[in-house]
Image (cartoon, rainbow, N blue to C red):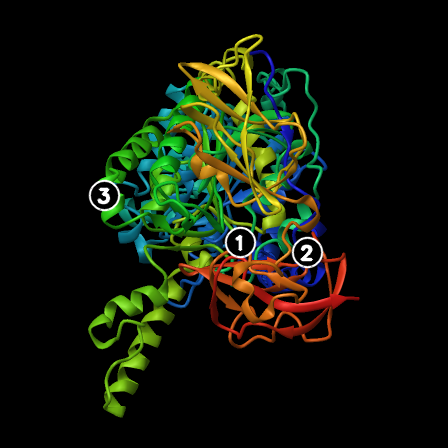
């Protein structure tokens, strides 16, 4: 198949999220985005203006000023590891960004990894986590074969904390091993030495392919102060290892330059000698295009309460070119979304956790929460991951996951085995993988969706990300379970003991909630960077370009011969030329039609709930002795698909099996004639879309979504439905007897009531 079948994906925001909810979400995130920007600004300042002045007085530039001169004009810097050591003190001192800037920087049209010692923070010393941060940046460059630029101005280890930086597997010496591995892989390394370059700082540039030294620079195993003390010699560090020594005598450096500016100019010239990016070749004639649906809307799509759901499809639609997507196996493993899209004109694979409720394929007529991995979804992820690896398509993982399914049924279905298959795939993939933690990153699901232990090239978090084994409230319940009843309420009568348990649970929940803070994760290097949702598209463009920049080191198949096409074809029913069609058998039940199979066979396709069908239209595919047969509607039969027939797909059926129910198009979604209406029969009402517990307000402390007398328009929220601790909004849908605009008259169910699908919730009248 020569063409990748990208299709429109997503909707206009107003069609699925009303203005009030969008603005509320946006306002809640706005404060966190401001905090993110303020934290970044504080870290970028290093130890402050006075230390920057000291650098300038020496005739040097600061690390960030050097990067500004190095990068291409009008290009963005993508810093990683910004928050390493954030919130930590070493004695009375802090080490913003661990005293080193690591960033993806575009230089002479090529993406590079720049590693620059922050000379405003203890003269660029290495603090605890500094070596690990440098090594992480080197690893990113190695995985993508990006040139590495070292801007060295380092006075060695911060000695009071040497026990945390010198020894260990990832201690300071591991940097030089990474230098060697980069060199062995043919990755260009260029070093500019701008000042102090002592001990480990002296070793760092040596393996580089080019080394430039300014007149103020020196590279020494030991500085003058140590030598004077040990050997009673009167020397300066420049005498010992300045450019006169290393450029003209030892050969440890290549070029001697007068100042920072000249060194940076020459580094740019060296980068320009390298091959240009292969990204444009791998666009296969396509152009980079923004999403059809605005990326800026991402800051308003996520509810403030992490228990409330949103539509993952709408997130993807705001990240990919033209909002076009090829979703594979959409009817299987519905808890996850897998597919292909272009980002910046380049193909990327996407694996994402769907939110909300889905039909339970194992239990007919029941629903289960998404955001959890079940058997089909795990198998779907593993097959897609392997195919992308085989085809050379980089993978983006969009995580919002609570974990794996648990219980007797999960074990019977072999989730351990399926999970191991997925973990094996992600552990052995050679294709670049990038992980975005949108919100929840919990339990083994965090591992299975290519969390940091499975070595994605980069892992990003947002200000609302929550990394944990389990939520704070859940852990508190587990810790105090023996003191709680079946409803998880405290089951002791003694007031003092009751108060102590309540306080203990609150303290446990608060501690766990604090541990889930994304900045704490970033400080510990449990994630690479914290970014706002609206910034994610720019990061994905970076990931795509860097993944395709350097050809020749990994498999990159032409899209015509992707394995993904083969897998997609095998999942489709056979479609022989001139294949036969049969009419559904129809049984009339009042004003509804039951559609029954005319023959025995394997049902492989059915229309979705809510689809409108006309006479003569195909409405399903039946495999009869291996031959695909179209099932069409007889003359005079039309209607809208009721219920959700997807659970019926891919199962054998006998002749006369009822699979579809059509109701009249004129009264779709009208709740007034349902069996559940009871005493409210004849009332114009908004029905419950599913069974669960109905709430009139977002949380117990918030006002209701609407007041009686308020005007409702399409998409505006009526309340929430909770199923298994998953909360989904109930929007107003003006269909059937419900006009486009209504006025709320009275509640037909109480706040917190259990309701069935179709139960009238709110009486309304035309506005």
Q: In the image as oriented, which residue stretches furthest toward the top?
A: 577
- Dot label at residue 715: 2
What is the spatial separation of the Cα atoms under label 1 and label 3, in whole angstroms? Answer: 56 Å
Residue occupying image coordinates x 61% and y 18%: 276
Residue occupying image coordinates x 43% and y 36%: 648
What is the spatial separation of the Cα atoms under label 2 and label 3, in whole angstroms? Answer: 40 Å
Residue 465, image x and y in percent? Answer: 47, 54
Residue located beneath label 1 in the image: 120
Residue 199, image x and y in percent? Answer: 35, 41
Give the side of residue 767 with respect to residue 727, left or right.
right
Residue occupying image coordinates x 69% and y 32%: 322
- Whether residue 460 is visible to the viewer of this picture, yes or no, is yes
Q: Quadrant of residue 422?
A: top left
Q: Quadrant of residue 555?
A: top left
Near-viewer residue (118 or 518): 518
Query: As displayed, is residue 430 above or below residue 297?
Result: above
Q: Residues within 10 Å of mark 1 (few under 14, many from 20)?
A: many
- Dot label at residue 411: 3
Local secondary structure at mark 1: loop
Local secondary structure at mark 2: loop
Q: Choose the circle earlier in sequence order: 2 or 3.
A: 3
Residue 720, image x and y in percent? Answer: 54, 63
- Whether residue 351 is visible to the viewer of this picture, yes or no, is no
Q: Quadrant of residue 472?
A: bottom left
Residue occupying image coordinates x 24% and y 72%: 480
Judged by depth in the image, the label closer to the viewer, 1 or 2, is 2
């Amino acid at each position: 198949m020569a063409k990748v079948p990208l299709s429109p994906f997503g909707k206009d925001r107003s069609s699925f999220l009303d203005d009030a909810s969008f603005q509320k979400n946006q306002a809640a995130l706005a404060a966190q985005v401001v905090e993110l920007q303020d934290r970044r600004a504080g870290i970028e300042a290093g130890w402050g203006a006075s230390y920057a002045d000291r650098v300038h007085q020496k005739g040097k530039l600061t690390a960030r000023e050097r990067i500004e001169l190095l990068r291409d004009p009008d290009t963005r810097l993508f810093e990683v590891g910004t928050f390493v050591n954030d919130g930590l003190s070493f004695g009375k001192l802090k080490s913003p960004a661990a005293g080193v800037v690591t960033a993806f920087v575009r230089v002479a049209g090529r993406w590079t990894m720049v590693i620059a010692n922050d000379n405003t923070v203890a003269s660029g010393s290495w603090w605890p986590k500094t070596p690990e941060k440098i090594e992480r940046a080197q690893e990113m460059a190695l995985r993508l074969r990006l040139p590495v630029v070292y801007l060295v101005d380092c006075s060695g280890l911060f000695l009071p904390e040497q026990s945390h930086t010198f020894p260990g597997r990832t201690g300071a010496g591991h940097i030089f091993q990474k230098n060697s591995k980069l060199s062995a892989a043919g990755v260009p390394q260029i070093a500019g030495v701008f000042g102090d370059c002592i001990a480990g700082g002296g070793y760092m540039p040596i393996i580089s392919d080019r080394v430039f030294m300014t007149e103020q620079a020196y590279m020494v195993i030991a500085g003058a102060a140590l030598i004077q003390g040990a050997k009673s010699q009167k020397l300066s560090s420049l005498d010992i290892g300045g450019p006169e020594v290393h450029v003209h005598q030892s050969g440890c450096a290549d070029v001697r330059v007068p100042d920072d500016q000249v060194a940076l100019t020459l580094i740019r010239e060296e980068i320009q000698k390298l091959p240009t990016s292969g990204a444009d070749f791998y666009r296969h004639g396509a152009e980079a295009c923004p999403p059809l649906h605005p990326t800026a809307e991402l800051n308003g799509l996520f509810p403030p309460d992490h228990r409330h759901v949103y539509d993952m499809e709408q997130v993807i639609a705001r990240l990919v070119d033209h909002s076009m997507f090829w979703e594979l196996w959409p009817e299987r493993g519905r808890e996850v979304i897998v597919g292909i899209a272009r980002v910046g004109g380049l193909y990327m694979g996407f694996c994402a956790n769907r939110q909300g409720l889905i039909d339970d394929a194992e239990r007919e007529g029941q629903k289960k929460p998404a955001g959890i991995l079940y058997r089909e979804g795990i198998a779907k992820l593993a097959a897609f991951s392997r195919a992308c690896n085989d085809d050379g398509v980089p993978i983006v993982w969009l995580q919002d996951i609570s974990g794996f399914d648990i219980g007797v049924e999960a074990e019977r279905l072999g989730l351990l085995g399926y999970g191991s298959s997925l973990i094996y795939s992600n552990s052995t993939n050679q294709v670049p993988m990038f992980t975005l933690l949108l919100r929840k990153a919990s339990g083994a699901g965090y591992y299975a969706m290519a969390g940091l232990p499975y070595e994605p090239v980069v892992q990003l978090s947002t200000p609302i990300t929550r990394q944990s084994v389990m939520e704070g409230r859940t852990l508190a319940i587990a810790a105090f379970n023996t003191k709680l009843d079946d409803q998880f309420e405290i089951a002791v009568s003694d007031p003092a003991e009751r108060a102590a348990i309540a306080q203990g649970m609150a303290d446990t929940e608060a501690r766990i909630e604090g541990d889930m803070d994304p900045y704490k994760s970033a400080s510990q290097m449990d994630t690479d960077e914290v970014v706002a949702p609206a910034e994610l598209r720019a990061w994905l463009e970076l990931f795509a370009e860097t993944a395709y920049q350097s050809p020749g080191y990994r498999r990159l198949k032409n899209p015509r011969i992707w394995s993904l096409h083969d897998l997609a074809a095998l999942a489709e029913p056979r479609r022989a030329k001139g294949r036969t069609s049969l009419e559904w058998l129809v049984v009339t039940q009042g004003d509804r039609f039951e559609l029954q199979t005319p023959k025995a066979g394997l049902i492989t396709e059915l229309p979705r709930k809510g689809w409108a069908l006309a006479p003569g239209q195909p409405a399903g595919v039946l495999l009869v002795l291996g031959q695909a047969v179209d099932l069409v509607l007889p003359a005079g039969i039309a209607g809208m698909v009721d219920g959700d027939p997807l659970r019926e797909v891919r199962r054998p059926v006998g002749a006369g099996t009822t699979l579809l129910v059509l109701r009249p198009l004129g009264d779709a979604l009208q709740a007034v004639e349902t069996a559940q209406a009871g005493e409210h029969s004849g009332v114009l009402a908004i029905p419950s879309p599913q069974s669960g517990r109905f709430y009139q307000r977002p949380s117990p402390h918030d006002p209701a979504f609407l007041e009686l007398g308020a005007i409702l328009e399409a998409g505006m929220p009526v309340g929430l439905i909770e199923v298994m601790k998953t909360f989904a909004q109930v929007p107003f849908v003006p269909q059937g007897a419900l006009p486009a605009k209504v006025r709320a008259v009275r509640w037909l169910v109480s706040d917190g009531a259990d309701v069935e699908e179709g139960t009238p919730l709110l009486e309304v009248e035309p506005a």
